[in-house]
Amino acid sequence: MGEITHIGLAVPDLDQAIDWYSKVFGFYTLAGPFEFEAVEADEENMTQDLQGTDIQKMRNAHLMSHNGIGIELFEFQQPAFNDETPPLHKGFFHICLIVDNLVESIERIVQHGGKQRSKIWQTTKGKPHFLVYTEDPFGNIIELYTRNTSEMYANK
């Protein structure tokens, strides 16, 4: 059996992303920021084992939500983060968070440099099951739910 513990997101500015996810969603820093520099690392290291030897310098931090699911933020410094758009229909393309108030959450996202990508959708007629797609200031898509996935899609 598997359980989701965290999602990894690449961002161009780690400090800005930590601040954004803290202010907008109430995430707190669990660990880090950590620094990786290949010139100071052991010949065998986790960073280059996963990302390849091209990665010479990066920073990362673990943030936690109130329900214990985390976001691990990565700032790739060398080679630098760039503005390439990943393939839109391959692999992971968004994260989903449950929020108490959809409209207030959208307003906080926009107020802090993010944006609303879709209209608010009701997934089950007559029930408080709503979702909306938004985006952080770094281009990562964040879907917002008013209920957990089981409540939103069970018995459809």
Image (cartoon, rainbow, N blue to C red):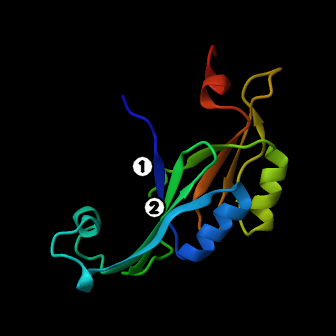
Depicted 105 relative to depicted 83: above or below? above
Quarter of the image where the N terminus is located: top left
Q: Quadrant of residue 129?
A: top right
Which residue does the numbered mark 1 point to in the structure image?
A: 90
- Say what secondary structure mark 2 lies in: loop
Query: Looking at the picture, how far across and down is residue 88, in whole percent?
Result: 49, 54
Give the residue type at disc 1. Answer: Lys
Q: Please tell me the numbered disc located at residue 61.
A: none
* Residue drawn at point x = 26 percent, y = 77 percent: 54
Q: Are marks 1 and 2 in contact (CB under 8 Å)?
A: yes
* Element assignment for label 1: loop
Residue 153 position (above or below residue 28): above
* The image quarter in which residue 28 lies: bottom right
Rounded to the nearest angstrom, the CA distance separating label 1 from label 2 is 8 Å
**Image x and y of residue 154, in percent:** 62, 18
Q: Is residue 96 visible?
A: yes
- Front-most of residues 85 and 49: 49
Going 67% across and 26% down the picture, which residue do you hit?
152
The residue under the point 63% across, 13% down is 155
The quadrant the C terminus occupies is top right
Using residue 119 as the reference point, say whether residue 32 is left or right of it. Answer: left
Q: Residue 15's spot in the image, x, y percent?
A: 58, 76
Whether residue 116 is visible:
no
Instruction: Indicate whether 105 appears above or below 98.
Output: below
Nearest the viewer among 5 and 30 is: 30
| Crowd around label 1: few <14 · some 14–19 · many ≥20 (10 Å) | few
Task: Indicate the position of residue 32 as horizontal and vertical percent values.
Answer: 48, 69
The residue tagged 2 is: 86
For residue 33, side relative to residue 101 (left or right): left
Q: Amino acid at mark 2?
A: Pro
